[in-house]
Amino acid sequence: MPDSSAVIAENIARIGERIARAAESAGRSVDDVSLMAVTKFHPLEAVRYAYLSGIRFFGENRVQEALAKYPPIRVSIKDASLHMIGTLQKNKINKALAIFDAIEGIDSVDTLRAVLTRIDGRKEPFRLYLELHTGEASKAGFPNLDELLRGCEAYAEFLEGDVDIKSARLCGLMTMAPFTQDSSEIRKSFKMLAAAKKEVEKRFHFSNFGELSMGMSNDFEIAIEEGATLVRIGTAIFGERDVHNA
């Protein structure tokens, strides 16, 4: 992993240029796409360097690593948002709610309901994303659109329970494309998520819903072309992961 703030800054600038080109080619504004730095297995210094280079979204896959890494720096990056992008185990929900600002890997109705019932009043609503399985080998996420819509119905029921509740906000959907060199398969995955978003918007009228978290180091330009609003980049920013920092 690069240990130089200059290298990380250069990588982020280069990715920013690629994001801008992809957005332009898709007829979109670059301002509609946010860059998340995925810091799994990367040390605290890398988080600091990325923040100083303009990153305001960070992603971690595991609750325990986030708890070990982020508390010392949260005060100095108050305007940054930390997202959990891995699968959330029910026995880790309370800890996840204590350290993260958003959970992207909501993959079942049961998990969604468990999270919603444990969210207390907050100054800022806790941000939630439903994950749809669109082809990635791990099979994470809601298995199909019907199940995803059941998740949306569960969220609608939560809102109906108390219209004044501001503790949670369903912001959008996320997915992981299959890890392949076949760009047509990758694009198919992202198109599926974009179509799911349109279906949710047609059936429900959730305020602040509409984000698409999709695209990683090897496929984020395709994701932007298909409507991504948040791309999750790790390797292209920090280099290969150092598992000894886990």
Image: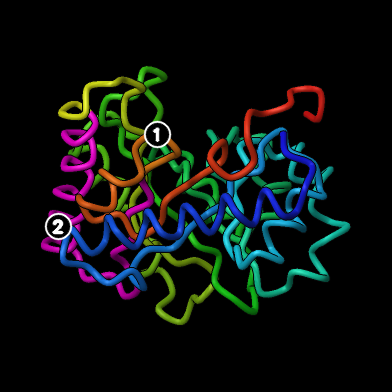
Magenta stretch: dominant SS?
helix
Work out whether residue 235 can be spotted. yes
Residue type highlighted by circle 2: Lys
Does residue 211 belong to the magenta stretch?
Answer: yes
Q: Which mark is residue 218?
A: 1
Q: Which residues are magenta?
A: 186-214
User: Closer to us: mark 2 or mark 1?
Assistant: 1
Q: Is residue 89 above or below residue 136?
A: below
Q: In this view of the protein, which residue sits in the foreground, 113 or 67?
A: 67
Q: Going 27% across and 42% down the picture, which residue do you hit? A: 148
- Nearest the eye: 211 or 151: 211
Residue 98 visible to an observer of this rendering:
no
* For residue 168, side relative to residue 193 (left or right): right
Mark 1 nearby-residue class (10 Å; few <14, some 14–19, many ≥20): few
Residue 199 sits above or below residue 162 on the image: above
Q: Which secondary structure, mark 2?
A: helix
Residue drawn at (21%, 52%), measured in percent from left and top? Answer: 225
CA gap between label 2 and label 1 equals 25 Å
Q: Position of residue 227 (x, y in %)?
A: 23, 56
Q: Is residue 35 above or below residue 66?
A: below
Q: Which residue is mark 2?
A: 198
Q: Is residue 137 left or right of residue 59?
A: left
In percent of width and height, residue 238 lies at 64, 41
Q: Quadrant of the C terminus?
A: top right
Quarter-of-image position of residue 212: bottom left
Which coloring applies here? rainbow
Q: Nearer the viewer, residue 22 or 58?
A: 22
Q: Quadrant of residue 188?
A: top left
Magenta stretch: residue 179 in it?
no
